[in-house]
Image: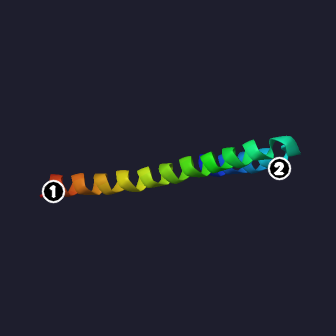
Amino acid sequence: MLLVVAALTVSLGFARLPDSLLGIGVVGVGVFLAISARICQAREQHQALCKALEGLRRG
């Protein structure tokens, strides 16, 4: 949910940038996308680790 709110905020902020700051805005959006992708990747890795630990507990 927070990631959706953050994406809306970034898109609204980027749309309101003056022409002189569009370059910085593109870099900012790129950084936001990179951080978002890393958060999703970490979530998947965390879930896989939890499943592996649960398997060790049972076995």
Q: Position of residue 12 (x, y in %)?
A: 79, 48
Question: Does any portion of residue 35 appear in the rendered image?
Answer: yes
Q: Examine the rendered structure and indicate whether residue 41 appears above or below residue 20.
A: below
- Disc on the earlier residue, 1 or 2: 2
Left-right relation of 40 to 11: left
Residue closest to the far right: 18
What is the basis of the colouring in this image? rainbow
Say which of 18 and 5 sits in front: 18
Helix or strand or loop: what does disc 2 sit on? helix
> Could you tell me the amino acid type at mark 1?
Arg
At 12% from the left and 58% from the top, the residue drawn is: 59
**In-image side of 58 versus 14 (left or right):** left
Query: x%, y% of residue 54?
Result: 23, 54
Q: Which mark is residue 58?
A: 1
- The CA span between labels 1 and 2 is 52 Å
> How crowded is the residue under tag 2: few (<14 C-alpha within 10 Å), some, or many (20+)?
few
Which three-letter amino acid code belongs to the residue tagged 2? Ala
In this view, the residue in front, 23 or 59, is: 23
Q: How many marks?
A: 2
Pick whichever, 19 or 41, lies toward us. 19
Q: Residues within 10 Å of mark 1 (few under 14, many from 20)?
A: few
Going 64% across and 50% down the picture, which residue do you hit?
A: 30
Q: Which mark is residue 15?
A: 2
Classify residue 32 as left or right of residue 12.
Answer: left
Which residue corresponds to the image point at 16% horizontal and 54% vertical from the top-left?
56
Q: Quadrant of residue 24?
A: top right
- Counting from the top left corner in percent of width and height, residue 25 is at 74, 45
**Residue displayed at 72% across by 46% down:** 10
